[in-house]
């Protein structure tokens, strides 16, 4: 069964639009941030490190995909937010403290909701053409 799920996930990523991939990255970041918080609450140090590592990998990917020529000031602001999230998650990892992760989760959720709305708007505009 695990193989089928893995194949499904791989296919859904390969066939997804750039917008869908962006939303999937945010969903995965949110999931790993929540799991990091839960691991700290359960005193699962290994799990905390694993989930924060995955969270940071996703944030780094999001940051490296920014196009500063096209995105301009928005890309600069997003890069600053990604830097903040990397710093905060590193502090959470070092100090074994869930509070910095709560801030990261809040930023991720806000950005995800904003991108979700932007993608909906883009689809509406594309259908109108």
Image: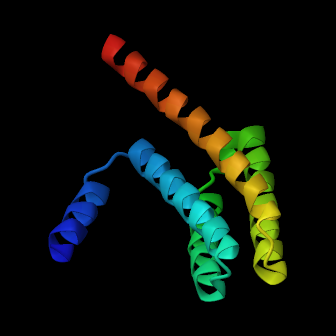
Measured as percent of width and height from the top left, residue 81 is found at: 77, 52
Q: Which residue is nearer to you in this view: 94 or 111?
A: 94
- Where residue 56 appears, as percent x and y from the top left, is 64, 71
- Identity of the residue drawn at 81% across and 62% down: 100
Tell me the quadrant of the picture where the N terminus can be found. Answer: bottom left
Residue 83 can be seen, yes or no: no
The quadrant where residue 85 appears: bottom right
Classify residue 99 as left or right of residue 32.
right
Residue found at x 68% / y 81%: 43
Horizontally, is 10 left or right of 73 in the view?
A: left
Q: Is residue 17 above or below residue 4?
A: above
Report which quarter residue 38 is drawn in: bottom right
Vertical relation: 123 (above or below) 46: above
Residue sitting at x 68%, y 53%: 105
Look at the picture and state if 36 lies above or below 13: below
Q: Residue at x 68, y 46 (%)?
A: 69
Please provide percent x and percent y for residue 17.
35, 45
Name the quarter where the C terminus is drawn.
Answer: top left
Q: Is residue 25 visible?
A: yes
Residue 67, percent from left and from top:
63, 51
Q: How many marks?
A: 0
Residue, far top: 128
Looking at the image, residue 16 lies above or below residue 122: below
Comparing 33 with 76, the one in front is 33
Residue found at the very far bottom of the displayed protein: 46
Q: Tell me the colour scheme of the image.
A: rainbow
State the residue in front, 94 or 12: 94
């Amino acid at each position: 069964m695990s193989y089928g799920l893995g194949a499904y996930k791989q296919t859904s990523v390969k066939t997804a639009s750039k917008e869908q991939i962006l939303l999937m990255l945010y969903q995965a970041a949110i999931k790993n941030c929540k799991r990091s918080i839960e691991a700290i609450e359960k005193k699962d140090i290994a799990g905390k490190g694993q989930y924060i590592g995955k969270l940071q990998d996703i944030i780094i990917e999001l940051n490296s995909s920014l196009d500063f020529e096209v995105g301009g000031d928005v890309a600069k602001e997003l890069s600053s937010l990604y830097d903040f999230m990397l710093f905060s998650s590193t502090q959470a990892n070092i100090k074994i403290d869930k509070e910095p992760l709560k801030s990261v989760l809040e930023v991720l959720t806000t950005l995800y909701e904003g991108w979700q709305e932007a993608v909906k708007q883009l689809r509406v505009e594309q259908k109108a053409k």
